[in-house]
Image (tube, rainbow, N blue to C red):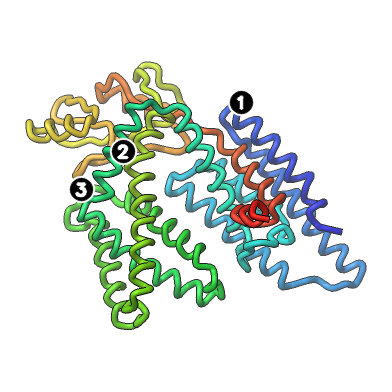
């Protein structure tokens, strides 16, 4: 019998109950996560006991893969929470689903030892699609004009273009080496996706370093590292001196620049208007999520005030300090954007700045999207991109 039938009750319970609580209350309860995880371990324990009773023997390779997949899912759950790409509840829910989806489901596009990578990919494809639909539905014509202006300004920026070329040239080679070691060298599309994903996560990583230290600018260190790797590749990898590689790399660079400019400088401005709203500081409540962090600097000079106003950033000066809504060079973080929401002490600090209004995020419930990703994985039996084969039949 297909093992999915043993896991399905736990999947449906966890998906339905967490989707309901996330939509209605904006919370994913730890109790439901624990029930889902315990259910998964109970099923696996039942398989072991059954194997011992029937003397079929335990499939140690299967359980070794279960261990590697569990550690991978845990690392992803923690890592994306640490970089503030989802809340702690979302991370724990992904971890529970990674345990509940049996390996037999991953028939198409399975990655040995870490099959839940397929689940993660499906969840983010569905999440991105849902966000795009909401943005397109709620955005105004003026918003599109502003987005296009920002997009073209950043897409054709020579400095950004050069940095992207160096980073992409180095990172794709490193990914290619890792994939060859893992035996995944034939999947070129996945190499592109991994390269784009890692390059997209680097800004989140660099944001964890303290700002204001000009001698230690992580973005320059990043460029030096990629530059050094690129030089090594030019010496070792002779395939880069072919016309076919040049054509492929130019196409990859264009796709990356379009993706990067849209996500960071185009759609990000649209999503800010769609998924956030302005609110009076007096009306702030615990649990609300700031759309922009608040930074603190010494009292701004006239030239600095002009720069801040040109960027349409909200600021206020109080005493010998200025508080700016949003990131600013050489500024110290005063209140950061926390995925778990504001606490009482955060609200008190904001009120002391003198700011009258701030923008708070109107979050999209992620539990239903996670559940949809799981259901899509079960129905398609693997990577969601496999749909193209069914549609073309």
Q: Quadrant of residue 30?
A: top right
Which mark is nearer the camera, 1 or 3? 1
Asked whether 290 or 107 is in front, the reply is 107
Local secondary structure at mark 3:
loop
Disc 2, SS: helix
Contact? badges 1 and 3 (CB < 8 Å): no
Query: Residue 8: where, in percent of width, then height?
Result: 78, 47
Work out how far the residue at label 1 is from the one at label 2, CA to CA, in angstroms: 35 Å
Label 2 CA crowd tier, 10 Å (few <14, some 14–19, many 20+): some
Q: Is residue 239 visible?
A: yes
Mark 2 lies on residue:
148
Q: Is residue 288 left or right of residue 296?
A: right
Horizontal side, residue 351 vs residue 285: left or right: left
Quarter of the rendering containing residue 62: bottom right
Residue carrying label 1: 24
> Who is closer to the viewer here, 226 or 18?
226
Measured in 3D between alpha carbons, the distance from the residue under mark 3 to the one under mark 2, in whole angstroms, is 31 Å
Find numbered disc 1 in the image and state the secondary structure of the residue it sits on: helix
The residue drawn where x is 28% and y is 35% is 326
> Which labelled disc corresponds to residue 212?
3
Q: Residues within 10 Å of mark 3 (few under 14, many from 20)?
A: some
Q: Is residue 22 above or below residue 36?
A: above
Q: Disc 1, disc 2: CB below 8 Å?
A: no
Sequence order check: which comes first, mark 1 or mark 2?
Answer: 1
Residue pictured at 30% horizontal, 59% vertical: 164
Q: Is residue 170 visible?
A: no
Q: Residue 188 at x, y = what percent?
A: 50, 67
């Amino acid at each position: 019998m297909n093992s999915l039938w043993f896991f399905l009750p736990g999947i449906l319970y966890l998906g339905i109950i967490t989707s309901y609580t996330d939509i209605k209350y904006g919370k994913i309860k730890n109790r439901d996560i624990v029930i889902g995880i315990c259910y998964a371990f109970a099923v696996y324990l039942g398989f072991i006991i059954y194997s011992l009773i029937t003397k079929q023997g335990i499939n140690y390779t299967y359980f070794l893969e279960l261990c590697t997949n569990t550690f991978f899912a845990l690392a992803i759950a923690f890592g994306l929470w640490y970089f503030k790409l989802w809340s702690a509840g979302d991370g724990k829910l992904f971890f529970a689903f990674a345990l509940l989806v049996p390996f037999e489901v991953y028939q198409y596009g399975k990655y040995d030892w870490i099959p839940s990578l397929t689940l993660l990919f499906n969840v983010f494809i569905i999440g991105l699609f849902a966000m795009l639909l909401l943005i397109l539905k709620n955005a105004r014509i003026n918003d599109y004009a502003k987005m296009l202006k920002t997009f073209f300004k950043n897409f054709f920026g020579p400095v950004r273009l050069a940095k992207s070329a160096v980073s992409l040239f180095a990172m794709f080679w490193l990914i290619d080496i890792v994939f060859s070691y893992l035996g995944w060298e034939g999947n070129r599309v996945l190499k592109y996706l991994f390269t784009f994903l890692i390059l997209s996560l680097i800004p989140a990583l660099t944001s964890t370093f303290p700002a204001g230290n000009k001698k230690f600018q992580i973005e320059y260190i990043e460029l030096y590292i990629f530059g050094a790797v690129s030089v090594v590749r030019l010496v070792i990898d002779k395939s880069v001196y072919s016309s076919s590689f040049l054509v492929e790399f130019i196409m990859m660079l264009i796709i990356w620049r379009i993706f990067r400019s849209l996500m960071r400088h185009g759609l990000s401005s649209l999503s800010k208007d769609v998924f956030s709203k302005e609110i009076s500081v007096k009306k702030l409540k615990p649990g609300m999520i700031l759309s922009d962090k608040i930074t603190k600097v010494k009292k701004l000079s006239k030239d600095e005030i002009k720069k801040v106003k040109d960027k349409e950033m909200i600021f206020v000066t109080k005493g010998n300090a200025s508080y700016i809504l949003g990131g600013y060079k050489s500024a110290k973080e005063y209140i950061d954007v926390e995925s778990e929401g504001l606490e009482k002490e955060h609200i008190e600090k904001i009120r002391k700045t003198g700011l009258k209004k701030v923008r708070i995020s109107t979050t999209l419930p992620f539990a239903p999207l996670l559940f949809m990703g799981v259901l899509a994985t079960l129905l398609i039996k693997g990577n969601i991109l496999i749909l193209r084969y069914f549609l073309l039949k």
